[in-house]
Image (tube, grey):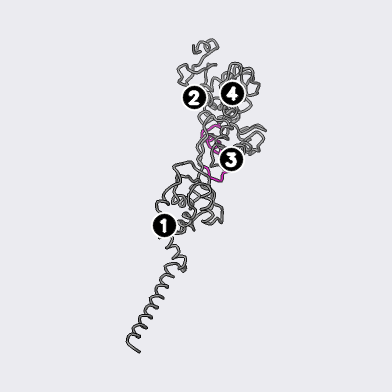
Amino acid sequence: MSRLVKLLIILFVALVILGVVAVGALFVISGGNPVDYLQTAIIRLSLQGRQDELDRPMSSDTTSQRFTVNLGDSPRTIGNNLYQAGLISDADLFVDYVRAYDIDVELEAGTYFLKRSQSIRQIAETLTDSRNSQIVFSIIEGWRMEEVAQAIGNNPLFGFSEDDFLRVVSASAEVDPAFAQEVGLPSGASLEGFLFPNTYSLPPDITPEGLRDLLLEEFTREIEEAGIPAEAEAQDTSIFDIVTLASIVQREAVHMDEGAKIAGVYVHRLEEGMKLDADPTVQYPLGEPGDWWTQITQADYTSTISPYNTYLNFGLPPGPIANPGIEAIRAAANPEETDYLYFQAECNGSGYHRFALNFAEHVANSCS
């Protein structure tokens, strides 16, 4: 055998050994899946020239959009759904990206709130943890329940409609008997007044019933911390009646440092056997979508035939006319002792009120 042939044989054997070693090393490095490893490496290489596309959002629109990843959805399905939703411009690029960087195995089923202002990288990262998705929802003090429902309907992140919510808080809805007993809720009454105003972080899968229960729990927690149940017991009255008065105070008092005085005027009127003559109780039955707190006219005081109209009916209205905050509830539970029987807005537009001992003084306080 010639020297050249021997060298060729040695070289061939060496190459085989190197090949075996290389394949073994590749097998170890790839975790036992060299084909997939090589494909991933090729994808990563191809992505090097598409970094701008990965970082370029669809638009500058920061509006949140509800997006659901169902259990068992593949990266391809997710990518196609993102594309159909207008959240990304290239489903294939999304699939390649999540595969190249092992994000495909981290994609998590759940409901997310995505924005067209997010890039593919940011969206992919977001879809790895559904716990980060929250609906931030605020209820303003003095809103009636229809306004709460309207805010739900105007928020695309909720998975239910305003009508769905109204069904579980209306007079025909079932109410937790323990809660009804605690607050003295009359049979057949709605939950107006008890949808506690606050800002809430809600899970994306919140239901109408879940939101209702959360609002009632917050109401209960707030009034207990403020000592309202004890005040109601000491005054031999119900929390329902306190909240009813508080709802009127909430609509009347622009500045809550006047809340206890305004509540005191109403309590004094009741003690004197007078009607409350509260404008918000006329506005309440007149309210309609787009104008829930309409500007009332002189004729409305007598033409608005409703048990809520305290210009026509003695005592408190049948129930709350709005959802008061804790300061208004405190004011109603602790009204200021006063001889005043009347009040009206200051003429300077400050939002404060002028108080009067009698009707003549009340007329004299009128703005000329």
Instruction: Assess disc 2: are there few (<14), some (14-19) or many (≥20) residues with their C-alpha within 10 Å of its C-alpha.
Output: some
Q: Which mark is residue 47?
A: 1
Segment tinted magenta in the rendering: 202-230
Residue type at the position of mark 2: Val
For the residue labelled by badge 4, is the local secondary structure a helix, a strand or a loop? helix
Q: Pointer 4: what residue?
A: 283
Camera-side residue of 336 and 320: 320
Q: Nearer the viewer, mark 2 or mark 1?
A: 1
Magenta stretch contains residue 128: no
Q: Furthest-bottom residue in view?
A: 1
Q: Pointer 3: what residue?
A: 213
- The alpha-carbon separation of the residues under discs 2 and 4 comes to 16 Å
Magenta stretch contains residue 224: yes
Q: Position of residue 175 (x, y in %)?
A: 64, 38
Q: Pointer 2: what residue?
A: 254
Query: Which residue is drawn at the image coordinates 38% and 76% (left, top)?
Result: 18
- The alpha-carbon separation of the residues under discs 2 and 1 comes to 59 Å
